[in-house]
Amino acid sequence: MVVASFTADVLRGISPLTVQFTVTVDSGDPVSYLWDFGDGTSSTDENPEHVFEHMGLHTIVLKITDADTSVTVVRQNNLIKVARVAFTARPLEGTRPLVVVFSNKSKAPNGMSFRNWEWNFGDDTPVSSERDPVHTYEIAGVFSVTLNAELVSE
């Protein structure tokens, strides 16, 4: 029978979150691995990298089979915490000066929250740290807006 554990290089973050998993085998001779990432996907790699697209708490289960077909199960409940940063804007077009209301739709899993909002409106104006800012576009154009935030434990 295999005695093993695993680690993840990142435990929390914002979707899409890339996590590298690493197995440590203390004893036994593994012949196969089956990972369940808690998001409907799996891998048979020994040390997989996985991208978490969906918000939530993800329980990771690793099943290791040895040459005698004995199966060792290593489970870490709610190990990976993934948040989602999103927003809406209204109106999306119009004449200048165009006043746009941004609504923050970001979500964090239980036990997590956001802080340090940073909005970049794409028009070379200062960033905003408001949760739901109103911004006036003084120049004509098409602008890419980004929202960043820090995910923290409550």
Image (spheres, rainbow, N blue to C red):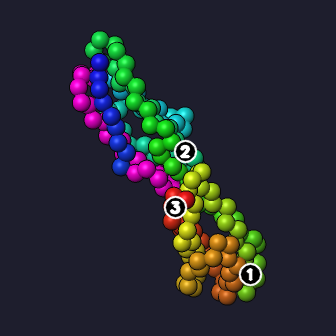
Left or right: 21 as drawn, with respect to 36: left
Residue 57's disc number: 2
Element type at marker 1? strand
Residue 149: tell me if it is visible. Answer: yes
Between discs 1 and 2, the one toward the N terminus: 2
Residue 151's disc number: 3
Question: Within 10 angstroms of label 3, few (less than 14), some, or many (20 or more) residues?
Answer: many
Q: Residue furthest top?
A: 68
Q: CA distance from mark 1 to mark 3?
A: 29 Å
Q: Which of the image's four quarters has the C terminus?
A: bottom right
Question: Within 10 angstroms of label 1, few (less than 14), some, or many (20 or more) residues?
Answer: some
Residue for point 23% across, 25% down: 27
Quarter occupied by residue 6: top left
Question: Within 10 angstroms of label 2, few (less than 14), some, or many (20 or more) residues?
Answer: many
Start-end of magenta stretch: 10-31
From the viewer's perspective, is the residue at label 1 or at label 2 nearer? 2
Identify residue for label 1: 99
Task: Tell me the chief SS of the magenta region.
Answer: strand
Left or right: 12 as drawn, with respect to 31: right
